[in-house]
C-alpha cells in the first residue's frame, strides 16, 4: 500500500504523543513492504520548504507554514491534503481533528481517508475561540468524509457514537520505547533528587493537564524528604508556564526539569516514587502508559481515560479538579508503599498484555485493507 500521513509536526519525535505514535507505527509498516510519506512542518526540524528526508524508511516531506500560533498546523495540513491528491495514495491518514478539517480534499481521488482522534482537541484551553471553532469543524469533517475513524480510548468511541451515530475503530496507544538509563542516577542526583522519593509530572505544561493543581496539593502535603519534579515543555502556553514558574520559584522541593529526552527522561521516570497526572482532559495518555510499563505507581484524576487505565487496582484515582482529594490520595500513597507496589505490578502486567505497538500496527493495516476492499462512496453523495 501507498500511505500518506498528515497532521504530525514531523519526525523524529520531540514533544508530542502523535509524533511518538507515528515513529512507532509507520516504520513497522515500511518494514512490511508498505510505502509511507509523512507531510511535516518545515518549522519542526528547521528544514527548507519541500525538502525531503528519510526517517526509518518513511519519506518526510517538509511543507511551508506560518509562524503564528495554531495557523502553522492548519496551513501544513491543508497543503498536505492538496499534495496528496496528485500522488495516487491508497490511504490518506489524518492524525488529530484539526488536520481532519481538510479530510474532504482527498475524497476526490480514489484514496481511502482515515482519521485518528487522539482527543477532543477543541476542548483544550491553549486554543483561542477561532482555533477551537476550526478544530470542531475538523471533527465534523472527519465524521462526514473519513472512510474509517480510529479512536484511542473507549470514551472517545462512545462520544462519536452518541454525538454523531458514527461507528469508530478502537485502537489504543502504547508506551514509547525507553533506552537504557544510568543505574547510578547521576542526572537525577544533579537535580537534588533521591530515587523513590519524588513525585513526577510528565507532560506538556498546559492548563488542561492541571500541573498547578498538583503543585497546590504537593504544598499541602508537607511530606518531609519528598520532592515534586515537573518534566515537560511549553505548547503555545508561555504565559501559563511563566505563572507556574513564579508560583514555585521559592520552593526548593519543586524542580522544573524542562523537556527531557532519551536516557535522561528514562532515568527520571524510573527513579520516581509516584507518577501523578491530574488532567481534566486526555485522550489516552502516553506518559501514564510509560509509567505503568516501567512499574512506577500511578495516582491520577478520575477522568474516563484514566479510569480505563488504572481502575481495578492498577493505581489510585482522585476527584478531578479537587486539590484536597489529590493531597489526600498522595498522602495515602506515600504512606502505603507496599500497597502501591502491588498496584504498580498489576499495572505493568496490564500494559504489557494490552498495549503493544506490533498489535497497533497490525490493527491499522487491517483497517486499511478492509477499507480498500470496500467500494468508494462518491463524494457528491456524502
Image: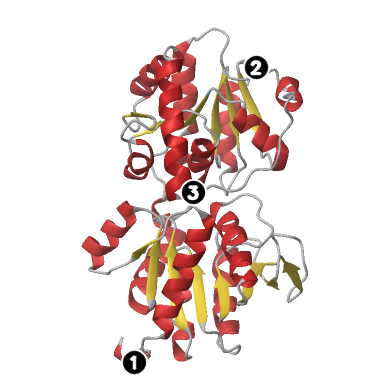
Secondary element under disc 3, as helix, strand or loop, is loop
Whole-percent x, y for residue 256 in the image: 64, 28
Camera sees residue 65: no
Q: Which image quarter: residue 210?
A: top left
Residue underneath mark 3:
126
Quadrant of the snapshot with the C terminus: bottom left
The residue lying at 73 percent from left, 20 percent from top is 189
The one of 371 and 44 positioned closer to us in this rendering:
371
Q: Are marks 3 and 2 in contact (CB under 8 Å)?
A: no
Label 2 crowd (10 A; few <14 / some 14-19 / many >=20) = some
The one of 223 and 63 positioned closer to us in this rendering:
223
9 shown above or below 355:
below
Q: Are marks 1 and 3 in contact (CB under 8 Å)?
A: no
The residue lying at 62 percent from left, 61 percent from top is 9
Q: Earlier in the sequence, mark 3 or mark 2?
A: 3
Secondary element under disc 1, as helix, strand or loop, is helix
Q: Is residue 238 left or right of residue 216?
A: right
Residue underneath mark 2:
194
Residue underneath mark 1:
380
Q: Earlier in the sequence, mark 1 or mark 2?
A: 2
Whole-percent x, y for residue 300 in the image: 40, 32
Q: Is residue 304 left or right of residue 327?
A: left
Q: Is residue 345 left or right of residue 16?
A: left
The one of 195 and 120 positioned closer to us in this rendering:
195
Q: Which image quarter: residue 32?
A: bottom right
Q: CA distance from mark 3 to mark 2?
A: 34 Å
Amino acid at each position: 500500500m501507498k500511505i500518506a500521513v498528515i497532521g504530525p509536526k514531523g519526525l523524529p519525535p520531540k514533544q508530542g504523543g502523535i509524533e511518538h505514535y507515528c515513529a512507532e507505527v509507520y516504520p513497522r509498516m515500511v518494514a512490511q513492504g508498505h510505502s509511507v510519506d509523512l507531510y511535516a512542518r518545515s518549522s519542526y526540524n528547521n528544514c527548507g520548504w519541500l525538502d525531503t528526508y528519510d526517517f526509518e524508511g518513511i519519506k518526510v516531506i517538509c511543507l511551508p507554514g506560518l509562524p503564528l500560533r495554531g495557523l502553522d498546523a492548519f496551513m501544513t495540513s491543508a497543503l498536505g491534503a492538496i499534495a496528496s491528491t496528485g500522488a495516487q495514495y491508497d490511504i490518506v491518514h489524518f492524525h488529530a481533528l484539526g488536520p481532519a478539517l481538510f479530510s474532504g480534499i482527498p475524497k476526490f481521488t480514489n484514496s481511502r481517508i482515515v482519521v485518528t482522534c487522539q482527543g477532543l482537541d477543541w476542548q483544550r484551553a491553549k486554543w483561542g475561540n477561532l482555533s477551537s471553532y476550526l478544530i470542531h469543524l475538523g471533527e465534523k469533517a472527519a465524521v462526514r468524509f473519513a472512510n474509517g475513524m480510529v479512536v484511542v480510548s473507549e470514551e472517545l468511541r462512545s462520544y462519536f457514537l452518541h454525538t454523531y451515530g458514527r461507528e469508530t475503530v478502537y485502537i489504543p496507544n502504547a508506551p514509547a520505547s525507553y533506552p537504557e538509563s544510568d543505574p547510578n542516577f547521576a542526572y537525577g542526583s544533579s537535580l537534588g533528587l533521591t530515587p523513590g522519593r519524588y513525585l513526577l509530572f510528565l507532560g506538556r505544561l498546559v492548563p488542561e493537564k492541571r500541573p498547578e493543581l498538583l503543585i497546590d496539593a504537593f504544598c499541602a502535603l508537607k511530606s518531609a524528604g519528598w520532592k515534586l519534579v515537573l518534566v515537560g515543555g511549553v505548547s503555545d502556553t508561555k504565559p501559563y508556564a511563566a505563572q507556574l514558574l513564579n508560583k514555585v520559584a521559592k520552593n526548593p522541593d519543586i524542580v522544573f526539569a524542562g523537556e527531557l529526552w532519551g536516557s535522561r527522561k528514562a532515568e527520571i521516570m524510573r527513579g520516581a516514587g509516584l507518577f501523578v497526572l491530574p488532567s481534566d482532559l486526555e485522550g489516552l495518555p502516553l506518559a501514564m502508559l510509560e509509567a505503568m510499563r516501567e512499574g512506577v505507581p500511578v495516582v491520577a484524576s478520575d477522568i474516563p481515560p484514566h479510569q480505563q487505565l488504572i481502575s481495578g487496582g492498577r493505581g489510585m484515582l482522585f476527584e478531578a479538579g479537587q486539590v484536597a482529594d489529590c493531597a489526600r490520595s498522595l498522602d495515602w500513597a506515600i504512606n502505603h508503599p507496599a500497597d502501591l507496589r502491588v498496584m504498580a505490578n498489576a499495572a505493568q502486567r496490564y500494559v504489557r498484555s494490552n498495549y503493544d505497538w506490533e498489535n497497533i500496527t497490525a490493527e491499522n493495516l487491517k483497517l486499511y485493507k478492509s477499507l480498500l476492499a470496500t467500494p468508494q462512496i462518491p463524494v457528491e453523495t456524502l
